[in-house]
Image (tube, rainbow, N blue to C red):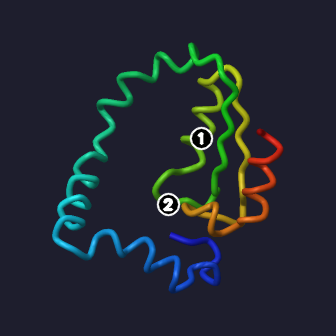
Amino acid sequence: MFSNEEQLTDTFLQGIISPYVQEQGKLSLVRNAAALNTNHTTALTHKLPEIEHPVLLLWGTEDPWQPVETGEQLERDLPDCTLIRFDDAAHWVPQEVPDKFSAEIKAFV
């Protein structure tokens, strides 16, 4: 989940887990897992070239769930897209490299 385990603080982990400890949260987690079927989104990928707005993708190259190749495909499909790769991050880019993440957002905006 993290490229640099030192960034996985107890506070961050509790923040990720806390919404799912109650019964309603557990049900939500099951629904989220069931929604991972991408059929409803992949059916729209042919429309990506029609997006006229600039897009910034910030991607951890060590992400085991969403590989950087997915970001690279999005960069090819979107006409005005910039993909920034963070070799020192995995899935939780804002937590793992907060200064770099913030700097890219500020530069983009």
- In the image, taking residue 14 as reference, residue 43 lies left or right, namely left
- Which is more toward the observer, 103 or 82? 103
Label 1 close to label 2 by CB (< 8 Å): no
Query: Label 1 amino acid?
Result: Gly
The residue lying at 65 percent from left, 32 percent from top is 75
- Which is more toward the observer, 52 or 37? 52
- Which is more toward the observer, 41 or 53? 53
User: Residue 71, labelled with which disc?
Assistant: 1
* Spot occupied by residue 68 in the image (x, y as percentages of width and height): 60, 48
Location of mark 2 (residue): 64
Quadrant housing residue 56: top right
The residue lying at 52 percent from left, 82 percent from top is 11
Distance between mark 1 and mark 2 Cα atoms: 13 Å
Earlier-in-chain disc, 1 versus 2: 2
Query: Taking 105 as reference, is 44 above or below it?
Result: above
The residue lying at 71 percent from left, 65 percent from top is 98
- In the image, taking residue 21 as reference, residue 6 lies left or right, namely right
Query: Taking 103 as reference, is 48 above or below it?
Result: above
The residue lying at 71 percent from left, 66 percent from top is 97
- In the image, taking residue 38 as reference, residue 11 lies left or right, namely right
Looking at the rendered structure, the secondary structure element under dot 2 is loop
Q: Quadrant of the C terminus?
A: top right
Query: Label 2 amino acid?
Result: Pro
Tell me the crowding category of disc 1: few under 14, some 14 to 19, or many 20 or more residues within 10 angstroms, Cα based. many
Looking at the rendered structure, the secondary structure element under dot 1 is helix
Tell me the crowding category of disc 2: few under 14, some 14 to 19, or many 20 or more residues within 10 angstroms, Cα based. few
* Spot occupied by residue 53 in the image (x, y as percentages of width and height): 66, 22
* Spot occupied by residue 51 in the image (x, y as percentages of width and height): 58, 18
